[in-house]
Image: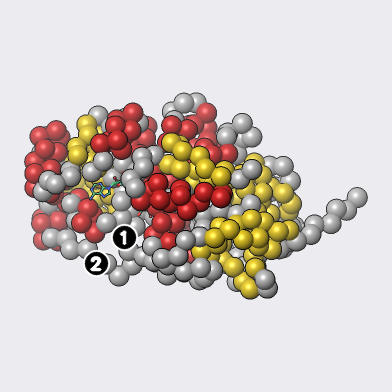
Amino acid sequence: MTTTIDTLTARAAVHAGSGQEMTLHQVEVAVPGPGQVRVRLRASGVCGSDRHVLDGDWTLPSPTIMGHEGAGVVESVGPGVTELQAGDHVVLTWFYPCLSCSACREGRSWVCTGSRSEECLLPDGTTPLSMDGQAVYPYLAVGSMAEYAVVPVQAAVRIPADVPFDVAALIGCSVATGVGAVVNDAEVKPGRSAVVIGSGGVGLCIVMGLRLAGAEPIIAVDVNDASLELAQGFGATHAINSSGRTTEDVAREIKELTDGGADYAFEAIGRVETIQQMPPFLTRGGTAVVVGLPPQDRPVALDLLAFAENGQRLLGSNYGSTVPARDFPLLARLYRSGRLPIDQLITRRRPLDEVNEAFEDMRAGARGRTVVLHE
Ligand code: APR
Ligand code: ZN
């Protein structure tokens, strides 16, 4: 028996350029090509990176379908796909590996040089979405704020069907990014001290990762008391509200809590000012990890003489150096066993019609993560 797969239409949140609100449109979704799968999305996280795009911090092909933190069910598969079948529950990755560059061949797919995710394109250079005959670009080749996505099969990772879709969506970005920064990039050992600057969706995942790794103490720094309270629920042993305080003042408090400075500092906001705070918070030999992504073309000033003299390390952490096929099922397992309480990150759920309001929540400083649910 052969089944025919047709093009579909899907409701999608389309962003036409910086400063503009997203508008809902019906877009055409192509038939999955060779090596591709079409996914019926069920949930999309509302992430700080989407906000960077909406605010014009980074330039992208336009019009864009927002959302890169998504989960759903495989609806159909293209020719040659054997790894997945219709009905599988999947988490999407926003950095699909090309599988053929030297980094991918060495098993270091997080530094793949052949992926076209950042161009919002499929491996063959096309986009599977269009609107009135015009190409539309799914953000990071995901576009999870639409009812359907077409992605290369290696961008969709099967997870157990009993993991709720909202939790699964967060595994696809904030959880992988935050836990991966701790476990894969910094490789934090038990008993080491850590500071996390920013307790938003990503910062809270870093706190969760630090608890998993056995860090002690875990100090959360934020300007919002409600976010700090949430951080303590995820394992922060101390909370510092840095609002209106100088870096030196906060550094003094951290030094008292950590015996002279933290072994690790993680920045999870993406602000030049807070990235510059990391070295003063560290002990000699400490490691600063840049997780938050600053606007493009905004250089950061660091005292590299002090940095070198103190034997400190600076790590750039992109997507927690995640290997999706390895890490997404592992993170789902840690959620199911209660070791990663990802569900507690979700403080609000909204339908797609309220996508602009979801970003307003974020700009207004809402704590935790909002998830958009597709009916
Ligand atoms: N000092 C300390 N905390 C701050 C400051 C500041 N100057 N400014 C903002 N914050 C806090 C906010 O109160 C909030 O709790 O930082 C947090 C930011 O969280 P979100 O807006 O939820 O952002 P998130 O989704 O976590 O993303 C953070 O990571 O992946 C990147 O692109 C993403 O750059 C973004 C960053
Ligand atoms: Zn993200």
Q: Which mark is residue 188?
A: none
Residue 348 location (% of width, % of height):
46, 38
Q: Residue 299 carries which label?
A: 2
Q: How far apart are marks 1 and 2 (CA)?
A: 9 Å
Amino acid at pointer 1: Pro
For image coordinates 16% across by 60% down, the residue present is 302
The residue lying at 12 percent from left, 46 percent from top is 245
Quickly name the residue at label 1.
294
Q: Name the quadrant containing residue 367.
A: top left
Q: Farthest right residue? A: 1
User: Dividing the image into 4 quarters, which one contains the C terminus?
Assistant: top right
Taking depth in this image into account, of 335 and 364 the one nearest to the observer is 364
- SS for callout 2: loop
The reply to whether residue 162 is visible in this rendering is: yes
The picture places residue 52, in percent across and down from the top left corner, at 39, 60
Q: Do the residues labelled 1 and 2 touch (CB within 8 Å)?
A: no
| Residue in view at x 50 percent, y 26 percent | 337
Colouring method of the image:
secondary structure
Determine the secondary structure under disc 1. Answer: loop
What x and y, as percent, mark residue 343? 47, 33
Q: Residues within 10 Å of mark 1 (few under 14, many from 20)?
A: many
Question: Compared with residue 117, is residue 172 higher up or lower down, i.e. above or below?
Answer: above
Please state the horizontal and vertical placement of residue 262, each as a whole percent of the image: 18, 40
- Looking at the image, residue 1 sits to the left or right of residue 189; the answer is right
Disc 2 marks a residue whose amino acid type is Pro
Which residue is painted at 74% across and 52% down in the image?
76
